[in-house]
Every structure is written in structure tokens, then in C-alpha cells.
Image (cartoon, coloured by chain):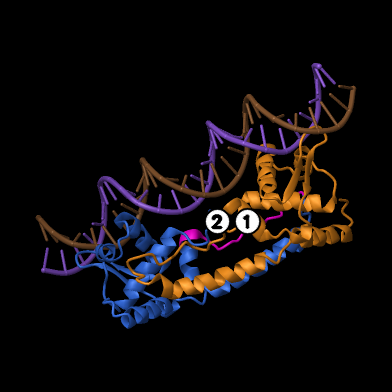
Chain colours: A blue, B orange, C purple, D brown
Amino acid sequence: MKGKLITRNTDYAVRALCFMAINGKEIISVDKLVKELKIPRPFLRKIMQALNKKGILQSYKGQGGGFTLSVPAEKIFLTDLITTFQGPLKLNECIFKKNICHNVNNCSLKNKIDTLEKYIISQLKSISVASLSEENNKILKKEGIPL
Amino acid sequence: MKGKLITRNTDYAVRALCFMAINGKEIISVDKLVKELKIPRPFLRKIMQALNKKGILQSYKGQGGGFTLSVPAEKIFLTDLITTFQGPLKLNECIFKKNICHNVNNCSLKNKIDTLEKYIISQLKSISVASLSEENNKILKKEGIPL
DNA sequence: TTTTAATGATACCTTATTTGTATCATTTTG
DNA sequence: CAAAATGATACAAATAAGGTATCATTAAAA
């Protein structure tokens, strides 16, 4: 049971970013996130560094350092995270390769897959970290679970 | 660049089934397919056996044996092949696991992902081997490429 | 009836990807 | 200068994908 579209590091990134979004402009260290979210520390460190390089996070070195969002949570989308950790989203490189498929440009399956792919991307593009953390936030409040 | 939704064996299966669909009720051996489609023989054998077990193919042992479709090509869908080789289609097991997500039932992301997942499945369910082989067939004919 | 050409079952292997660990260098604050 | 953070990077383990090999079984044909 494989062929996942979303991998673990993307998952962890979403959780970390949601936590940061809830905590406003506060500088958050990896240590803090590890304690809150129970993500393996060295793995999360790599993830945060990747997000920093990608321009999604701003890092602060030294004592009291950590990370802040360098992009508003409303403008961080699932697609950004997926492409950061998994490269460009592709359902399949090209299901009909040479031999059978004499024309890559006109392949019926390729056309259908491409259409589906575009739709999926557009949907993932509409899911922001802000919307996720907000909505979960509401739910938690409603249930009286302390953040 | 990973996180593919469609893997190689699914791809090979599509190609093999399309070839068989074009060739009507004829019994086709793995050898024949290998020569036509240039798929690694032992790998294709495993694939055909899996399709047989799944009930999509009928096998004939012994000399002159091989496989026929045991389901009309119009009723073999991409979803069937994906689930045969990759298990149930899942975008992500559950992106918000415990800790952050106190309520699996009400998770905003899970809801969005689930909706998208359902859409994808419905689309893949609408793509049949028949439609693929037909359309490619037309294209090939139009371009004067001999089958 | 023996040979031949096919599939059935299954164990194994190789490579790529995912997931995670460890370490040392660098920076910043106190 | 020490402590606490990140930067960079190399390494390692687990899992999945892709592929190979072999022996048993079956059925047609010589």
C-alpha cells in the first residue's frame, strides 16, 4: 500500500508551521517544536532548514534563536510544502512510454492524467497553513481543549 | 521527485491490457507481450499473475496458453489496476496524527484531503482500458502508424 | 508417452526513496 | 568566554519499487 502523494516530512512541516502560525511572530526553536509535536529532533531540524532555504521560514542563530514564518500563514500552501520535500507533483512521469505510445503529444491517457494532475494541484494550492491552523484552533477551543 | 500516485507495474499493466483489448479474444502469451511491449519478462509475468488472481485475466496453461481478458475492457478501470498493485489509493494516511489533532473526526485538513481523494478516485474510475486503447488506436491509425 | 511451451508459486536480489541520526562548524546572546 | 541556538553535511536504517530466478504444474503436440 504505497504510492502516497504526501510524505512524512511534508506532514511534519504542516504540523510545525501550524504551531508557529498559532503562536504569532514569536521566535520558535526546534527544541520547543520537538517538545510540543513529538517529532524526531534531527529530522525536524533538517525540515526547518529546508523551509528556511525555501524562503518560507526566517532563521535566527545563537542563544534564544529559532525560526519565524517569513511568509504569512495565509500564503503558505500545501503545494509549497509538497514541492519542497518531494519535488514537482507528478501522478506519473508518462504512463505510456515509447513503443506503444508513438505520440507523446497526443496520448489519450496522458491527456487525462495531466488534466487530473492540474486539478489536484489547484486544490492543494487552495489549502493554506492559515486555514488549517485556524480551523483546528476553532475546533480545539470549541471542545475546551487547552492549546 | 517522488510521491508518485501511479507506479511502474500499474503502467505496465495498462500497456499489456490495452494490447490485449486491441487483439480481441485471442489468447496472448507473456512472450508475445514481452516482444511487443518490451517489458522485462519475469516482471510482466508477476503482473499478469496478479491480474489473473484479481479476476481481470483468465489464464490458460500449457502449450499455446496465455491470457485473455476475463472482464470486458470497458469495465477495467485505472482504479482497479492501481489498487491491484498499490493497495487502496490514499493521499496520506492521516496528515494530522495525534498530538496536534485531538479529533480525527473533525480535522479540517483531513476533510479537505478526503474530499480531494474521493474526487481523484472518481476520475480514475472513469478511465477504462477500452477508452485508452480505442483512443490510442484511432490516433495511430490517423497517423498511418501500423499496429 | 515424451517433449515442449506455457503459467503458478515463490523466494530472492538490487536499487531508490524515505526516514532518521550524528557531528562539527558557526553565530548570537548573556 | 560559555551556552544555546542554527548551518552544513555525511552517514545509516527501514521501507518500497523494480526486477530476477527457479522449480512445480499443466496441456498440447510430436
Q: Is residue A29 left or right of residue A70?
A: left
Q: CA distance from mark 2 to mark 1?
A: 9 Å
Chain of the residue displaying label 1 = B
Q: Give A5 or B116, whichever is nearer the viewer.
A: B116
Q: Are marks 2 and 1 in contact (CB under 8 Å)?
A: yes
Q: Residue at x 37, y 66 (%)?
A: A52
The verdict on residue B83 being magenta is no
Q: Is residue B26 left or right of residue A18?
A: right
Q: Give A96 or C26, whichever is nearer the viewer.
A: A96
Identity of the amino acid at label 2?
A: Gly
Tell me the quarter of the picture where residue A139 sits: bottom left
**For residue A3, which numbered disc appears in the image?**
2
The label nearer to you, 2 versus 1, is 1
* Same chain, labels 2 and 1: no
List x then y, in percent, for residue B102: 34, 71
Tell me the quarter of the picture where residue A37 sits: bottom left
The residue that mark 1 highlights is B82
Q: Is residue A122 left or right of residue B58?
A: left
Q: Is residue C8 left or right of residue D8?
A: right
List x then y, in percent, for residue B78: 68, 59
Identity of the amino acid at label 1?
A: Ile
Please provide the residue range marked out in magenta: A85-99
Q: Give B101 or A48, whichever is nearer the viewer.
A: B101
List x then y, in percent, for residue A135: 40, 80
Residue A117 in sight here = no
Q: Residue at x 65, y 41 (%)?
A: B46
